[in-house]
Image (cartoon, helix red, strand yellow):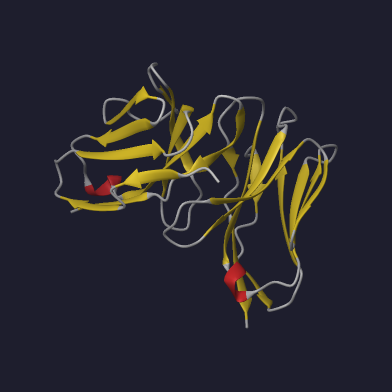
Amino acid sequence: GAVVSQHPSRVICKSGTSVKIECRSLDFQATTMFWYRQFPKQSLMLMATSNEGSKATYEQGVEKDKFLINHASLTLSTLTVTSAHPEDSSFYICSAREERGGSGYFGPGTRLLVL
Amino acid sequence: QKEVEQDPGPLSVPEGAIVSLNCTYSNSAFQYFMWYRQYSRKGPELLMYTYSSGNKEDGRFTAQVDKSSKYISLFIRDSQPSDSATYLCAMRAGNTPLVFGKGTRLSVIA
């Protein structure tokens, strides 16, 4: 089946630094990618939706200047957490969907810990 | 009322039992319904994907959708300890983002 990768799988950083997370669709072209955040024992919360070549659409309450999303190609989207703080520590998961729709495929997630 | 309601559990069953998981929803526009399994510290894995009402079976898993009642179910037959995970229902209307339930934590005890 289709595979979506994320890198890094885990990152620990100091407060105030920026962290970039990559999401790649390995064997299909993802016209739409979604970024989610998941806190312990909570469900996935959609942060933003990005279409290749367009600006991302952010969900209410998600700061677009803090969570920068770039979807420059059909196989790569990046999420940059700028000036990270301890409250940004979470599990970040991307999902990629092909043009024809479908359920989309999830990446394995990136665990971010901000000290 | 949240768009998708799912009992978070935890649900604990003995090995071999039939597990019934379900979600209710309020948006009648939802057409696509999914069930995901998520192991701890991993991304969600798609188990079942159905369109509109009806049943779908895949191995030990059966998904049911009743749009008239806005109710979906996932049944797991002959449950195994390896089925222990969090099960998330998700749904969407057209080409919109998925809306997830909170997830139900399942433990299958050997």
Residue B58 lies in quadrant:
bottom right
- Residue B82 horizontal side relative to residue B31, left or right: left
Residue extending farthest to the bottom is B110
Give the percent coordinates (x, y) of residue B100: 58, 43
Residue B21, compared with residue A53, is above or below; it is below
Give the percent coordinates (x, y) of residue A16: 14, 41
Front residue (pair A113, B9):
A113
Residue depicted at 63% across the width and 83% down the height: B110
* Quadrant including the C terminus of chain A: bottom left
Residue depicted at 21% across the width and 34% down the height: A82
Residue depicted at 60% across the width and 75% down the height: B81
Label count reads: 0
Give the percent coordinates (x, y) of residue B101: 60, 47
Residue B72, compared with residue B42, is above or below; it is above
- Residue A44 horizontal side relative to residue B37, left or right: left
Front residue (pair B88, B50):
B50
Residue depicted at 31% across the width and 38% down the height: A22
Front residue (pair A35, A100):
A100
Give the percent coordinates (x, y) of residue A109: 39, 49
Residue extending farthest to the top is A54
